[in-house]
Amino acid sequence: QVQLVESGGGLVQAGGSLRLSCTGSSGGGSFNAMGWFRQRSGKQRELVAIITSGGNTNYADSVKARFTISRDSAKNTVYLQMNSLKPEDTAVYYCYAQLQIQPGVSRPSWGQGTQITVSS
């Protein structure tokens, strides 16, 4: 059973910064892509940023140049550095990871979510 434990959420003023961390228990396996999604009130969950095991990244247009995703594969940990936060970044942020079951097959898992509130 994969567990993803998030930390780093909270309340911040507009223009401020926060850093999210998410550590996964893989049972000895390895994670392929890891990333972050968010769900704003009344909206569907959306991709924020994702990073592959090879280090390739992809960002939502709304966060490019403000957010940076990184990972420490040895620690099964993914980070999201969020700068220049805006009120519209207010959401529950979810960690996401794909556990490799066998070559070409992976199982997605989600964290419990952490609230980020950006005040204007």
Image (tube, grey):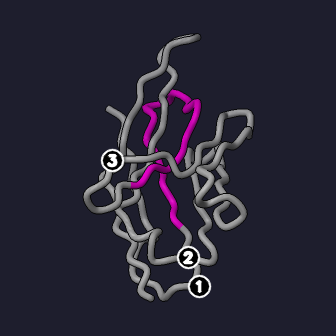
Residue closest to the eye, 25 or 61 = 61
Q: Are marks 1 and 2 in contact (CB under 8 Å)?
A: yes
Q: Which residue is mark 3?
A: 44
Q: Nearer the viewer, residue 45 or 113?
A: 45
Foreground: disc 2 or disc 3: 3
Q: Is residue 86 magenta?
A: no
Residue identified by numbered label 1: 15
Residue at coordinates 56% horizontally, 70% vertically from top-left?
19
Chief secondary structure of the magenta span?
Answer: strand
Mark 2 lies on a secondary structure that is loop
Which label's residue is closer to the chain start, 1 or 2? 1
Q: Residues at badges 3 and 1 in contact (C-beta under 8 Å)?
A: no
Query: Which quarter of the figure has residue 90?
Result: bottom left
| Residue 113 position (above or below residue 84) | above
Name the foreground residue: 66 vs 35. Answer: 66
**In the image, what residue type sits under mark 1?**
Gly
Secondary structure of residue under mark 3: loop
Q: Write down the residue under mark 2.
A: 85
Residue 62 location (% of width, % of height): 59, 59
Residue stretch in magenta = 20-38
